[in-house]
Image (tube, rainbow, N blue to C red):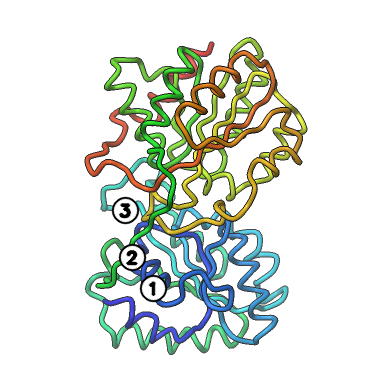
Amino acid sequence: MTVEQLVNIIGADFYTGVPDSQLKALCNYLMNEYGIDPKHHVIAANEGNCTALAAGYHLATGKVPVVYMQNSGEGNVINPVASLLNDKVYAIPVIFIVGWRGEPGIHDEPQHIYQGEVTVKLLDDMDIESFVIGKETTEDELRSAMAHFRDVLATGKDVAFVVRKGALSYDGKVEYKNDNKMVREEIIRHIVQASGEDPIVSTTGKASRELFEIREANGQSHKYDFLTVGSMGHSSSIAMGVAINKPDMRVWCVDGDGAVLMHMGSMALLGANKPSNLIHVVINNSAHETVGGMPTVAGQIDLVGIAKACGYPYVVSVDTFEDLDRELEDAKNRKALSLIEVKCSIGARDDLGRPTTTALENKQNFMEYIK
């Protein structure tokens, strides 16, 4: 099924969401059709953020909005769905489009397996009626489902289209790029060199994959690294939990701009507690690159200023390897919570692999090392 067919059948004029590789066809269509336009299309910080924004749109217009997301984002929408949208509260109708990662029977990464198993059940538990779109779904079947959904939406309830892998197609192309010169994998290589045998907590997506491959290429153990393969936005909080309980170890967090935006409250917590043995490196390419390259707002805000306001004792932004190396060395010797923002290009190797150890092995090896 083409994205154009889906969009035409739904008939909405406002979309907000967090990009997903399974929904890349939809994301690319929206970028080509609207770009980032607060009247029609907004890429938000997290899925709960999208849901509240959609509620505001409905309050202002009386029309039904669309919220798109990977199924991992269902956890972020449970609260606003249950306590804001639900027909026992404000009865705000929303159409959700959910990318079904980890669908049972379809091979996927470990962080998606359980989420895939409970995707439809969670929607049922939130009283959101769902319709699954697969490669074989016909336009007539989708029209019939949407006709039924309109009746459901009219009662103030929410509905969801759950999209299987490869179910949507789009012929349009979008090129995502920025003007930054530093490549993320090389940035992480410099961090690995500076960190020595210190533990590293790395964020979800390509950053953790690149860290794993750098250790392989260096012939190093993976025991130094906790790879946060899921749970986007929580790496810095994991690192804080480690740093506070291992005060004699220097702990590094390799973070991304999309992850920082997703749960920015963690920066306030870090700034207030100031663990002196934590170095927070935010690699900022202003993009959700792991799922396709769609933009974040991180290129339009002052992450350094935000970190300062949160109470980080030392913050800096760099865009050259010379400055990066100097700041990494200074942070090692400072004995104070530090944030280093690194301006980064968009792009990764086509042959970038994935961790060959299991998540459980990663946890056990990391715990044994820092013990």
Q: Secondary structure at mark 3?
A: loop
> Residue 331: horizontal and vertical position, in percent?
60, 20
Say the numbered circle drawn on residue 104.
3
- Neighbor class of circle 1 (other Cα within 10 Å; few <14, some 14-19, many 20+) is few
Quadrant in the picture for residue 247:
top right
Q: Is residue 264 above or below residue 196?
A: below
| Mark toward the viewer: 2 or 3 | 2
Indicate the amino acid at tag 2: Val
Q: Nearer the viewer, residue 174 or 231?
A: 174
Indicate the amino acid at tag 3: Pro
Residue beneath disc 1: 32
Please indicate whether residue 314 sits to the left or right of residue 25 in the image.
right
Residue positioned 39% across, 55% down in the render: 177
Q: Secondary structure at mark 2?
A: loop
Residue beneath disc 2: 174
Residue positioned 56% across, 59% down in the render: 47
Marks 1 and 2 sit apart, C-alpha to C-alpha, by 7 Å
Q: Nearer the viewer, residue 222 or 112?
A: 222
Marks 3 and 1 sit apart, C-alpha to C-alpha, by 32 Å
Residue positioned 53% across, 69% down in the render: 16
Q: Is residue 252 above or below residue 107?
A: above
| Mark toward the viewer: 3 or 1 | 1
Q: Nearer the viewer, residue 22 or 335?
A: 335
Mark earlier in primary sequence (1, 2): 1
- Neighbor class of circle 3 (other Cα within 10 Å; few <14, some 14-19, many 20+) is some
